[in-house]
Every structure is written in C-alpha cells, then in structure tokens.
C-alpha cells in the first residue's frame, strides 16, 4: 500500500467514523422523545456512546496533524475552528428561543457560553441545548492539549502515557462516586472523565506517524472480538452492577469504536456517513434546536416519526451552508491570527491542521 493510498484510507475512516458517531448521537437525541419499548430504547441509548469515539478522534486528529506552533497560535486556531461556530450557533439559538418560545434572554446563561464559565455551573450547563455539555468538555481538552503533547514527548512511551490518562479518569470516577456527584453535569462532564480517550487517540496518531498499521486495518476477528467484549461488559455494567455507569465509558468506547470499524469495512452508507463527518460540528450544534422548533409548531399535527424525519432532513439542510460559511471564515481569519501570535515566544508543540485534517479535531 503506497503512502498516498494509505493516507487516503486513513482519512476516509476518520471522516466516516465521525459521521457514524454523529448520526448515532442525533438519532439517540431524536428517538428519546418517542418512548420506544424497552429493548429498542436501550439500543437507541447506545447511540450516545458516539461521544466517546469523538473524544478519541479529537486527540487523534490534533496529533496526526501536529507541527511546531506556539501555544497561543494553537489556541487561536481552535478559536477560529470551533469557538466561532459555537458562538454563532448559541447566539442564533438564543434569538430563536426568544422569537419562537417567547423565552426571555438569560444573560447569565448566555454569558456562561461566551465566557466559558458555564462548564463549571450545572444549572446552565445544558442551556440552549442539552448537547452543549460536550462542547465544554472538548474546550477543556483543547486547553490542556499543549501540555499533554509535551508530556507525550517527555515520556516517549505509549504504555506509560496511556496509563497516565487512564489513571486520571479512574481517579475522577472515584471522586464522582465518593462525593455522590454522578448526576451533576458540571462534574460528570469534566475533561478528566474523558481524558483517557483523548490521550488514546494521541497514541494511535503517533503510532500512525511512525508508519505502524492503523487500528481500523487490524484483523477482522480482533475487531469483532473487541466489539463483542466491549458490548457485553458495557451491558453488564449498566444493567447489573451498582455504580456501573461510572465506569461504563471505558467499554462503551470499545463497543462503539469496534462497531464503527466493522461498519466502515462493510462499506455501510459510506458516502453519506463520510460527508456527515465533514459537517459534524455544525450538525451537532443545530440538530436539537431544529427538533424543538418543529415540535413547537407541529406536535399534535404530525406524528413524531414524521417530525423526527423532517428535523433530520432540515438539520442537514442547515448544516451544509453553515459548514461552508465556517470554512470560509476559518480560511480568512486563521492565518491572520496565526501571524499575529507568531510574534509571541514559541511554546510546546501544538497542532495546526491542514484542510483535510481540520475535520479531525473534534466537535
């Protein structure tokens, strides 16, 4: 396999995996309103596990496309790529809440989004969309990424780096259980909960840079085994073990990640899901607001399945131009910010993604 062909396949899987995760998350959110029977409801809830693969892919993308940048340059690029679309979405959703639902502006919640302190306040963590907790966790991981990259270089040992991340997450799990904070969103979505997934993505990316085979090209029997074992343990923890949800994430990633590889290798809806991966940030930001607006106008007039289908279609229709707009803004503002902050002293290695890699950086 040539280097060029290998790179193409690698990027193809990552875009596909992001789209696979995003569609699963959207369906999870949408079907929650339909009160499905027990087994179907449990199956739909599995779609929420897509966030774990997203965290892994975020660390993977940043490290795969890593080059020498100052810390301020790195933060400026993240501002242009992720925060600006996030701010725009929050502003539009806040206006829609006022115009459609006659909800007064909650200036405290709005300020929490724009000044990023809502990640520490469970009361406003889910304001303007229950899915926005993910953005808080992702931003926190971006903030610590330059430090993590430096630690990865110093250790220069994948196992030690992984154990460090896993230990941090296990410690945080113990804190949540010990202090009875599992249901507090500001606590259970703190970045330490997911740092092991992010750091595992960094490890996989470095192995790929070292010309080692990517995990999605592993033996089919191994991928299938990982999926089955992860799924079985996850189900046992969720349904049969007290506080099992506290450590469910570890096996949810194995299960969902394995399933994404199997689906990719089966070419399951590859064109659709690969394209979905390229607009995943925009879809994530708008899909719940669109559903709630449609429910406001059409609940009782149309059946819930029709509303859900309409919401899914409209989410894509809105996200496509939103993504194009964000790309143009990024292409214009990112070089300006990078040149401005290049005047500052250089810090540890950070990431600057090219046009294809920018879509790997998480949402």
Image: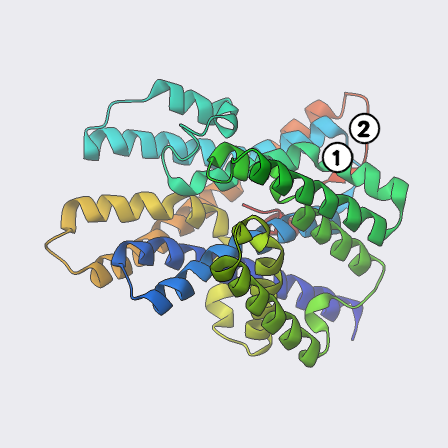
- In the picture shown, does residue 3 fall above or below 107? below
The 10 Å Cα crowd at callout 2, few under 14, some 14 to 19, many 20 or more, is some
**Residue 276: numbered disc:** none
- The quadrant the N terminus occupies is bottom right
> Can residue 65 be seen at all in this image of the molecule?
no
Is 206 left or right of 316, judged from the image as shown?
right
Is residue 286 visible from the viewing direction of this image? yes
* Residue at image point 39% right, 24% down: 109
Going 71% across and 41% down the picture, which residue do you hit? 168
Relative placement, left or right, of 290 versus 304 is right
Expressed as whole percent of the image width and height from the top left, the position of residue 118 reads: 47, 26
Query: Which of the two residues, 287 or 186, is positioned nearer the viewer here?
Result: 186
Residue 160 percent location from the top left of the image: 84, 49
Any mark on residue 347, and which? 2
Residue occupying the point 85% across, 59% down: 210
Residue furthest out toward the left: 301
Distance from Cα at disc 1 to Cα at disc 2: 8 Å
**Is disc 1 surrounded by few (<14), some (14 to 19) or many (20+) residues within 10 Å?**
many
- Which numbered disc covers residue 146? 1
State the quadrant of the C terminus: top right
Q: Contact (CB < 8 A) between labels 1 and 2?
A: yes
- Closer to viewer: mark 1 or mark 2: 1
- What residue do we see at 45% from left, 42% from top? 325
């Amino acid at each position: 396999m040539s280097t060029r062909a290998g790179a193409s396949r690698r990027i193809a899987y990552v875009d596909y995996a992001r789209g696979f995760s995003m569609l699963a998350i959207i369906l999870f959110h949408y079907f929650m309103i339909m009160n499905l029977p027990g087994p179907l409801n449990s199956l739909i809830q599995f779609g929420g596990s897509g966030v774990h693969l997203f965290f892994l892919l975020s660390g993977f993308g940043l490290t795969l496309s890593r080059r020498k940048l100052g810390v301020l340059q790195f933060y400026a690029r993240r501002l242009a790529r992720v925060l600006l679309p996030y701010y725009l979405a929050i502003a539009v959703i806040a206006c829609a809440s006022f115009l459609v639902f006659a909800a007064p502006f909650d200036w405290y919640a709005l300020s929490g989004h724009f000044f990023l302190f809502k990640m520490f306040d469970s009361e406003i963590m889910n304001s303007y969309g229950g899915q926005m907790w993910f953005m808080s966790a992702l931003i926190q991981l971006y903030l610590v990424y330059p430090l993590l990259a430096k630690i990865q270089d110093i250790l220069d040992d994948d196992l030690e780096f992984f154990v460090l991340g896993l230990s941090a997450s296990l410690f945080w799990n113990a804190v949540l259980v010990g202090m009875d904070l599992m249901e507090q969103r500001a606590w259970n979505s703190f970045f330490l909960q997911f740092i092991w997934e992010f750091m595992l993505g960094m490890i996989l990316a470095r192995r790929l840079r070292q010309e080692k085979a990517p995990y999605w090209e592993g033996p089919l029997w191994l991928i299938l085994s990982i999926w089955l074992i992860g799924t079985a343990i996850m189900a046992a923890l969720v349904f049969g073990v007290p506080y099992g949800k506290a450590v469910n994430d570890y096996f949810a990633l194995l299960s969902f990640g394995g399933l994404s590889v199997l689906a990719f290798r089966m070419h399951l809806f590859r064109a659709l899901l690969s394209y979905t991966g390229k607009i995943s940030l925009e879809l994530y930001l708008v899909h719940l607001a669109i559903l709630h607006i449609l429910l406001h106008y059409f609940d009782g007039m149309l059946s819930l399945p029709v509303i859900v289908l309409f919401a899914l279609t409209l989410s894509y229709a809105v996200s496509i131009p939103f993504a194009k707009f964000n790309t143009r803004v990024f292409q214009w503002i990112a070089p300006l910010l990078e040149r401005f902050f290049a005047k500052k002293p250089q810090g540890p290695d950070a990431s600057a993604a090219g046009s294809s890699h920018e879509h790997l950086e998480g949402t």
